[in-house]
Image: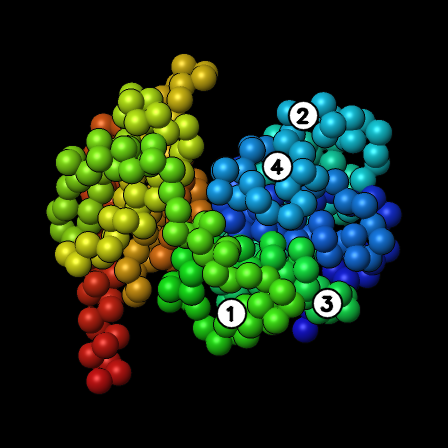
Amino acid sequence: MLDPTLLTTLQEAQSLLCISHVNPDGDAVGSLLGMGWLLRRLHKDPVLALQDVPPPEFAWMPGMETLLTAQSPAYQQAVRETPFDVVVCLDASSQDRMGNAYNPSVHGSAPLIVIDHHVTNTYFGHINWVDTGCAATCQMVAYLAQALGVPLEGELAECLLTGLVTDTLCFRTSNTDERVLAVATQLVQGGANLAQITERTINRRPFSLLRLWGLVLPRVRLEDRVIWTTVSQSQLQEAGHRSHDTHLSSLLITADEADISAVFLEKAMDDGVPAVECSFRAKPGFDVSRIALQLGGGGHPPASGCTVSGTLEEVAARVVPLLQEARRAQAIHREQSIRDTA
Ligand SMILES: [Mn+2]
């Protein structure tokens, strides 16, 4: 059952601002654009905003031209001219994940609705709908559409299926249950093209990414069933890869000999302070979300991340032992619970 306050707040809102997270992925873009299509069906004209431009593999998504980046004059103007009466935050586990698209001193007076599926969500909204049983925020937006009587068809279905496909790596993650497949079936019935979405998102990657993998993979390390590597700014430049999306942690976790993978990516230093983006993956039965949360980030048990200050070498030297220790503790706990149930 969906919170009736959430439904009436959305129904009664006159002007809405919808925001998703920094470095947007398919679920961020899909849920944001999907929310746009859903609200338009309710005769509303929401402003859709993001801090960062979505990666090129999502450029084809319907409604992309309606997305505004926080820096754009159109967004600045919308914020100046429109007193938003509701802000909806999608797929973000904490307020800072909205980046500069959300300004508490400007938007703080409007009720903030949080719609998210991350286990590390901090419940930072006035209305918080957090369902960690959902594999994607797009799945939640599909339930929202149904609760509001909006059919899952056309552009809405296309956007929501994109988030489901990307967050489940095309229905391969351990949280892909029958509810996920049931929603996906409805979206396909509504006209979303599963094969085309998969082809455009999962089955393709820029050549620059393959070049980056070529530069980075020779230095992969595996110790105590934790596999990791580092990515420097000079490697990104040499490969000509502009995005911070390297898909390397998902690649590394496929190693049979690893339970946890980590990728440490050197951030561009705009303020003179070195910092590293950490991306973690875990095999089923292991949990990297707690370490990410402990380090100021968040995510899901099998996939999470954080940003840690320090150089690449410093951060890797600090974080890898934490992962190894957590992995050992989780493996012991796992063996005990297997023994207890045997
Ligand atoms: Mn998501």
Mark 4 touches mark 2? (CB < 8 Å): no
In this view of the protein, can residue 95 be seen by the observer?
Answer: no
Q: Gap between marks 4 and 2, in whole Å?
A: 10 Å
Between disc 2 and disc 3, the foreground one is 3
For residue 153, above or below residue 30: below
Q: Residues within 10 Å of mark 4 (few under 14, many from 20)?
A: many
Residue name at image x 31 percent, y 50 percent: 250
On whether ligand 1 comes within 8 Å of the CB at mark 2, the answer is: no
- On the image, the x and y values in percent for residue 38 come to 73, 56
Mark 2 touches mark 1? (CB < 8 Å): no
Kind of residue at disc 2: Ser
Q: Gap between marks 2 and 1, in whole Å?
A: 35 Å
Q: Which residue is mark 3?
A: 151
Kind of element beneath mark 3: loop
Q: Which residue is mark 4?
A: 50
Precedes in sequence: disc 4 or disc 2 = 4
Q: Which residue is mark 2?
A: 72
